[in-house]
Amino acid sequence: MKKSSLFTAYSAMMGAVIMWGISFVATKVALESFPTFTLIFFRFGAASCCFLMLIARRGAPRFSRKDHGKIFLMALFEPGLYFIFETIGLQYTSAAKTSLLIATIPVAVMVLAALFLGERTGPAGIMGILLSLAGIVVLVVGDPNFDLTFGGSMAGDMLIAGAVISCAFYMVIARNMGQSHSPLEITMMQIIYGAVFFAPLFLWELPSIDWAAISGRSTAALVYLAFFATLAAFLCNNYALSRIPASQASVFINGIPVVTVLSAWFLLGEVLTGLQLAGGALVLLAVFLTNLPALLTSVRSQNK
């Protein structure tokens, strides 16, 4: 791959991580007014409206029945099952344990990418994954509200594990689809299917919504979630997965808690400790080490 294409792919993945990291702060604000699944439906529904307008002008993307099946599965895993498992799981287990379990996504992706895509992770990649896990541990322990007992039930942990597996399957399928279809076409159908999945849950919550109590800041947070954390972030992520191996891209996911901690400190005034900064630095180092071999290979090929 050309050096410029590799740089663009990494930039897109970093953009997705930044937007998803900030989304946790925006979600916290939006949930002040919106029920959980109503918020998720509005996120994907608003983004879907943009894509439907694009389809009206350019026509629907051409996918075979088999490809539609793959995208349906991709959207089922994320946003579908991932958000459901994570949202319900957080009600039964601690935030600290959830962060640690979610940090194993790169490990799950590495295994699935080897099984289904034939990708092999070298020593640098494995070291990067382990280092990113260590960074997340330091980040979690450095939280002033860290609970040493972790708390939670086995059911909650299993639900979060389901979220991990769902995200891993999404990344592997997106990587596979990205070899034959454009990121825009894939994201378009993924977001529309996602809105369809959450429509029944929205209708279930609809009678309980107090529309008069919805604040302007919650509405602004929803706008961010729909057009940046959903539309733009998934587009960036799917673009990156069409250019770089899933196992390399997945390590970037562990940068999300780092962005969340920094954005919560900057936007919400939450406490940021030195230990959390050290954990964040470890995660960033892990991302660099995991992708270093590809960068060196690209530079060598350009100099020949």
Image (cartoon, rainbow, N blue to C red):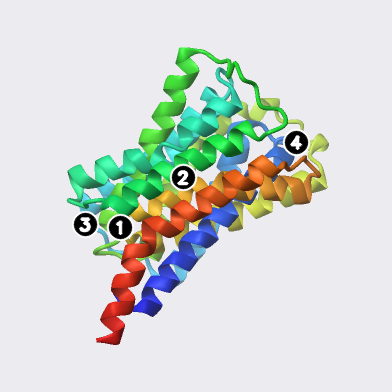
- Which SS class for mark 4? loop
The number of numbered discs placed on residues in the rendered structure image is 4
Circles 1 and 3: CB atoms closer than 8 Å: no
Identify the residue under disc 2.
132
Identify the residue under disc 4.
33
- Which SS class for mark 2? helix
Q: Is residue 124 left or right of residue 88?
A: left
Crowd around label 2: few <14 · some 14–19 · many ≥20 (10 Å): many
Depth check: 289 or 186 in front? Answer: 289
Q: CA distance from mark 3 to mark 2?
A: 38 Å
Depth check: 22 or 280 in front? Answer: 280
Q: Is residue 11 left or right of residue 246?
A: right
Circles 3 and 2: CB atoms closer than 8 Å: no
Crowd around label 3: few <14 · some 14–19 · many ≥20 (10 Å): few
Q: Nearer the viewer, mark 3 or mark 2?
A: 2
Q: CA distance from mark 2 to mark 1?
A: 17 Å
Q: CA distance from mark 4 to mark 2?
A: 35 Å
In primary-sequence order, the first of circles 4 and 3 is 4
Identify the residue under disc 3.
64
Circles 4 and 3: CB atoms closer than 8 Å: no
Crowd around label 1: few <14 · some 14–19 · many ≥20 (10 Å): many
Does 277 appear above or below 202?
A: below
Residue 178 on image: x %, y %: 30, 61
Q: Nearer the viewer, mark 4 or mark 1?
A: 1
Q: Nearer the viewer, mark 4 or mark 2?
A: 2
In primary-sequence order, the first of circles 2 and 1 is 2
In primary-sequence order, the first of circles 1 and 3 is 3
Circle 3: residue type = Ser
In the rendered view of the protein, which quadrant contains the C terminus? bottom left
Q: Is residue 267 left or right of residue 231?
A: right
Residue 245 tag number: 1
